[in-house]
Amino acid sequence: MDWYFILEIKKYFKYFHEINANSLIEKAYLFCSFLFYTKIIKHLKEYDFNNLIVFADMQPVDNLVSQYFGALGKDTITLQHGLFVNYEGFYNISSVSYKNVVSNHFLAWGNENKKLIQKYKPNCKVVVCGNPTIEPYRGDGQNSEFFTIFFDWDLFKNENVEMINIAYKVSDALGIKFNLRMHPSNDKSNYKIDESYLINNMDYKESMFMLGHTSSMIHICQRLGMPVFKYDTNVPSSPVHDKSLFKKSEDVLVKVKDINSYKDKYKNNIGPIGGESLECYRIFFNSIK
């Protein structure tokens, strides 16, 4: 513990008893968080700047500094860190991503999220700049020896189980195995998977086709012009062409017969990519003072 922190405790301890908390430990945690935030503000105030750019202004620190410096007349800008889904009518913590925008400018990946931000924050200036980390795919075509499944996070465990049961039937009908890409948050012990159906260490981009539910990978692959089919449930998700939806294995097998018609690049969720996207960001940042 450095002397700065000790001096800050002494300076602000008068506010400790004003913190509303359920326990002494929680109160101490909130007080330490307060000291942490005030330290960040103090250091940032040492810089002379006109524009503040944050990674994602629904995150605690990003939100705090955007509000603070926005109130001081600074121009505040937030980037988009992932695809946002409209959860209107459903409870989902992810809705904070678009309901709590506090920046003056929002640099969106595509038009769907632009409309979503404008719906909840009409005073925010939304500019579609795309995602420069996604590079155009220049592969020679899909591999007929396997397909890929994109799992969702475990909140949608039931849908994951339903989807893999569909995949077993598709695999049997086509006589090919599948590549399973689990979500980083998945607890593998929640799933009983027949390993005999799996093909490992394969690049999903070379799949004959992909299956997914609400994973952002669906929309990345569609933007690249790959054949992706989306499991159709009542769970809110980013939109796709209706023709890409499936409910059962028979739906997938029908689509596979006309696989080339599903390779169009769907740009509503993700607009510019790669160098084209970088150029959009360059134009935006050159436009601000």
Image (spheres, rainbow, N blue to C red):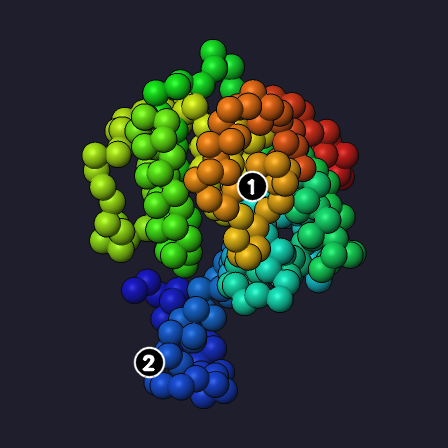
Report the quarter where the N terminus lies. bottom left
Residue 80 location, x and y as percent? 59, 45
- Element class at badge 1: strand
Rendered position, 38 above or below 140: below
| Amino acid type of the residue that numbered disc 2 sits on in the rendered structure | Ile
Query: Is label 2 in contact with label 1 (beta carbons under 8 Å)?
Result: no
Give 200 or 120, whichever is nearer the viewer. Answer: 200
Q: Work out whether residue 112 or residue 43 is closer to the camera in this orientation and state it.
A: 112
User: Where is residue 131 shown, x and y percent of the image?
Assistant: 58, 33
User: Which amino acid type corresponds to the residue marked 1 in the rendered image?
Assistant: Leu
Q: Where is residue 84 in the image (x, y as percent from the top left)?
A: 58, 50
Horizontal side of 160 relative to 256 (left or right) equals left
Residue at 40 percent of width and 71 percent of height: 32
Mark 1 — residue?
Answer: 245
Tag 2 secondary structure: helix
Could you tell me which residue is drawn at 60 percent across and 23 percent down?
261
Q: Name the residue under label 2.
A: 25
